[in-house]
């Protein structure tokens, strides 16, 4: 049994590979991850990490104590038949790259817009010829809202995931709906930009904690895929 970990900026996602099938991803804190590793005694722990170096070091030590292999994935080591869109692959975040690799498995031979909506919102374009054509990184919805509240004196409110993005009649809803609408508009503009580049998007793949709300507000062909990064990681369990 293999354990896959996606160590992000705000949470750790945990998934198991059994007979090449993925378990449902779980969000765990650091101590819970260590407890699971010690309890399950997996053959290998495969890590995709963009932050939290101290935890990764502690996790590696725990794996050594538990007698299981530990492997941290790095983008230059995980290049496949997909042509990477960065001139320096090491600058492309491993979580973004795993989402792109996963997208090629979920929607083969399609022009796919990959949206990972978490602490940051990342957008990547993958062509049906398996070429990664680059993308964008912007603040996530939560980050935008928090920045607005922290850097203004009189704009105050609570964070929410609104059911609709219509114009609102109070400050809190103005901020929430506005920041969500900005992210939806960014995705819609990305689809337009892809068309300008002669890569018409046939599917939008959404992952990350904010993916569900975004999907509800997008009109295009979208697929919510919470396990997308893990689908990509699964291709490298033998590294």
Image: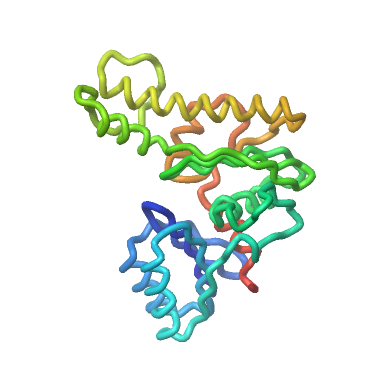
Name the colouring of the figure: rainbow
Looking at the image, residue 169 sits to the left or right of residue 44; the answer is: left
Q: Quadrant of residue 231?
A: bottom right
**In the image, residue 106 above or below residue 193:** below
Residue at the right extreme of this rendering = 129
Residue at the front extreme of this rendering = 88
Say which of 88 and 68 sits in front: 88
Say which of 134 and 12 sits in front: 134
Residue 204 x %, y %: 61, 36
Q: Quarter of the image for the N terminus: give it.
A: bottom right
Q: How many marks?
A: 0
- Residue at the spot 61% in from the left edge and 70% down from the top edge: 237
Looking at the image, residue 193 sits to the left or right of residue 50; the answer is: right
Q: Quadrant of residue 65?
A: bottom left
Residue 31 x %, y %: 31, 68
- Residue at the spot 44% in from the left edge and 24% down from the top edge: 181
Say which of 144 and 24 sits in front: 144
Looking at the image, residue 210 sits to the left or right of residue 91; the answer is: left
Say which of 10 and 67 sits in front: 10
- Residue at the spot 37% in from the left edge and 14% down from the top edge: 167
Residue 211 x %, y %: 48, 39
Q: Quarter of the image for the C terminus: give it.
A: bottom right
Looking at the image, residue 227 sits to the left or right of residue 145; the answer is: right
**In the image, residue 164 above or below residue 110:** above
**In the image, residue 196 above or below residue 23:** above
Residue 17 x %, y %: 55, 67
């Amino acid at each position: 049994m293999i354990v896959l970990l996606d160590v992000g900026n705000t949470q750790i996602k945990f998934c198991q590979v059994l007979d090449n099938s993925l378990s449902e991803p779980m969000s765990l804190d650091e101590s819970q991850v260590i407890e699971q590793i010690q309890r399950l005694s997996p053959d290998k722990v495969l890590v995709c990490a963009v932050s939290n170096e101290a935890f990764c070091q502690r996790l590696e030590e725990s794996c050594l104590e538990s007698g299981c292999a530990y492997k941290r994935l790095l983008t230059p080591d995980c290049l496949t038949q997909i042509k990477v869109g960065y001139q320096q692959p090491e600058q492309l975040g491993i979580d973004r790259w795993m989402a792109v690799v996963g997208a090629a498995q979920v929607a083969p031979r399609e022009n796919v817009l990959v949206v990972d909506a978490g602490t940051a919102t990342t957008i990547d374009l993958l062509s049906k010829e398996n070429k990664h054509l680059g993308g964008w990184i912007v603040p996530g919805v939560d980050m935008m809202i928090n920045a607005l509240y922290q850097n203004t004196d009189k704009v105050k409110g609570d964070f929410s995931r609104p059911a609709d993005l219509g114009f609102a009649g109070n400050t809190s809803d103005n901020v929430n709906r506005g920041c969500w609408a900005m992210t939806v508009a960014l995705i819609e503009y990305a689809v337009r930009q892809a068309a300008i580049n002669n890569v018409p998007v046939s599917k939008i793949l959404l992952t990350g904690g904010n993916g569900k709300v975004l999907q509800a507000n997008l009109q295009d062909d979208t697929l919510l895929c919470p396990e997308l990064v893990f689908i990509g990681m699964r291709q490298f369990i033998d590294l």
